[in-house]
Amino acid sequence: MPKQTYPVFTFLLAMWLVYFVDLAIPADLTHLGLLPRSLRGLLGIVTAPFLHGGLGHLIGNTIPLAILMSLTIASRHRAWMVIVAIILISGCLLWVVGRSANHVGASGLVFGLCTFLITVGIRERKLASLGIAILVIFLFGTTLIWGVVPSFGSQVSWDGHLCGAVAGLAVGIFTTQKATAFF
């Protein structure tokens, strides 16, 4: 396993360990999720990405995160600053504007990394970053579009997805310089 993939593996392992600890103990850790506009919900800004509502939810976030985090780490010098910024900005946005529900899961980070990598590709216009942006659009474009559409009555945190996408866009804009020429 390449050295730069260790942090990705560690992050994903932490998500899985939290899930198995949650199964093993009598308490339900998902109550530590993000509850918008509540004092208790502030902790969820950092804990929500590690908490999941079930095995399907965890698997559904693990695979895209493995791909997107690996692409981010392989292509950015300060990848972990980007990842932490997306988690914090999307969590803060969700805390301010989110539906009154307990939000858990790492899909905000998934959506944030998608929009970050696409934004960087468009702004930098370098062959590598454009290639990554095209790959992300190919792999996750449909999910990115339909995942931010409000689905009222659903347990899916479309507002968390939207906040993650906005955070990724903002981090992409503020951490790159727009290229003046193509390639």
Image: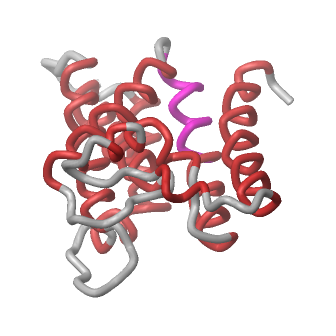
- Quadrant of the snapshot with the C terminus: top left
- Residue 117 is a magenta residue: no
| Whether residue 135 can be seen here | no
Front in this rendered view, residue 51 or 73: 51
Residue 107 percent across, percent down from the top left = 45, 56
At x 27% / y 24%, what residue is drawn? 124
Q: Is residue 47 visible?
A: yes
Q: State the residue in front, 96 or 87.
A: 96
Per the rendered image, the range of residues in magenta is 67-76
Type of colouring: secondary structure
Q: 26 or 63, which is in the foreground? A: 26
41 left or right of 59?
Answer: left
Q: Vertical placement of 182 versus 87: above or below?
A: above
Snapshot quadrant of residue 89: top left
**Residue at position x 59%, y 26% in the image:** 74
Residue at 39% across / 36% down in the picture?
A: 87
Q: Is residue 122 above or below residue 182?
A: below
**Looking at the rendering, in which quadrant would you find the N terminus?**
top right
Is residue 73 highlighted in magenta? Answer: yes
Q: Quadrant of residue 117?
A: top left
- Image position of 47 (left or right of 60): left
Residue 63 location in percent, x, y?
Answer: 65, 57
User: Which of the two residues, 71 or 32, is positioned nearer the viewer here?
Assistant: 32
Residue at the far bottom: name it. 153
Q: Is residue 14 above or below residue 153?
A: above
**Left of 68 or right of it: where is 165?**
left
Q: Is residue 76 left or right of residue 126?
A: right
Considering the whole magenta stretch, tell me its main secondary structure. helix
Residue lying farthest to the front in this orientation = 26
In the rendered image, residue 81, in percent from the top left (x then y), is placed at 43, 18
